[in-house]
Amino acid sequence: MTIEVRNLSKRYGDRYAVRDLSFTVLPGKVTGFLGPNGAGKSTTMRAIVGLDRPTAGQALIDGRSYASYQDPLQQVGALLDAKAAHRSRTAWNYLTSIAATHHIPRSRVDEVLDATGLTSVARKKVGGFSLGMGQRLGIAAALLGDPSTLILDEPVNGLDPEGVTWVRTLLDALATEGRTVFLSSHLLSELALIADHVVIIGRGEILADSPLDALTTGGQSRVRVRTTDTTALSNRLATPGVAITSSERELLEIDGLTTEQIARAAQEADILLTELTPLHQTLEDAYNALTHDAVEYASTGH
């Protein structure tokens, strides 16, 4: 199932939470949704599942609005608030009540409890759950209808390292099955390990809509070079448009040349290279560059 956001705008008074957003989330991929606090991520996700009514534009799932599905949980699973379950209810009771109102077999409750590691605490009240356990329960609810599409807002928030790895493995497996996975996260290093595509917004507008590889290799690349003769190599490579820096002995970082160009120049000058490593910008580098002017609350260094 494909998620289509078409010219989506949502205004509160004279302020736009999102303005004229358009992007597509395709099945068989994990699409990361990024942006600073207040950028409009939650508003967009809520609009997709019909919790916020757009001021203009629309958000469709396989060409239909979420509200038009008779069995929405069997089409779209969403985690937008890990604290949605009432504190006085047990995990089992919470999931069973959802299953009963959506014609989902009770056996499925046991399956998602087991899949999310909550079987041992299924009869405990949600009020006693840690943040990580609450996240697991929210994911269990999203999986309850075995949906083709998953929309998850900060699914790894509060999880320990084992839980973060579990979520990564789960989402990768779901995308491999051909499902649509759309998630937001502030853990950029973690998202870089799983996302195939990234949508970045700032101040309610699109800043990037790109495959992850294109985003992280699209910036200026740098090459790290180690050699016992840095002076000779620097002299050999010093041409207009080439920047060479050194932070330690026998190490150079070179902008403006490819690894092949550097290797060929070293070979021609009979200079031995002990390392030649391309250094592409990370997702964090790309994100910070794109959102630099779109951060609502920016800190200052001392």
Image (cartoon, grey):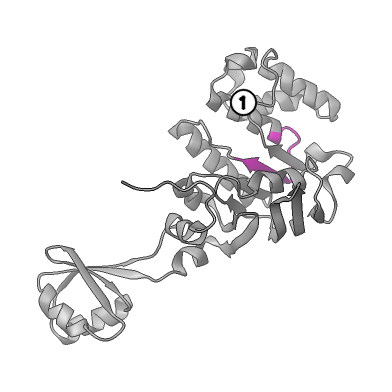
In percent of the image, x 10 and y 74: which residue is there?
A: 229
Query: Which residue is nearer to you in this view: 261 or 235?
Result: 235
Q: Few, some or many C-alpha atoms within 10 Å of disc 1 (few <14, some 14-19, many ≥20)?
A: some
What's the residue type where badge 1 is placed? Asp
Q: Is residue 178 above or below residue 73?
A: below
Give residue 68's position: percent from left, percent from top: 89, 45
Q: Is residue 225 above or below residue 185?
A: below
Question: Does the magenta-highlighted stretch encompass residue 146?
Answer: yes
Write the start and end of the magenta stretch as one range. 142-153
Q: Is residue 120 above or below residue 22?
A: above
Q: Going by the image, does 30 lie left or right of 98?
A: left
Query: Which residue is nearer to you in this view: 197 or 123?
Result: 197
Instruction: State whether residue 40 appears in this view.
Output: yes
Q: Which residue is mark 1?
A: 114
Instruction: State whether residue 2 appears in this view.
Output: no
In percent of the image, x 46 and y 56: which residue is there?
A: 288
Q: Going by the image, does 233 lie left or right of 14?
A: left
Q: Going by the image, does 64 lie left or right of 279?
A: right
Query: Which residue is nearer to you in this view: 168 or 217?
Result: 217
Question: Does the magenta-highlighted stretch encompass residue 243?
Answer: no
Give residue 200's position: percent from left, percent from top: 58, 57
Give residue 130's position: percent from left, percent from top: 54, 21
Image quadrant where residue 119 sits: top right
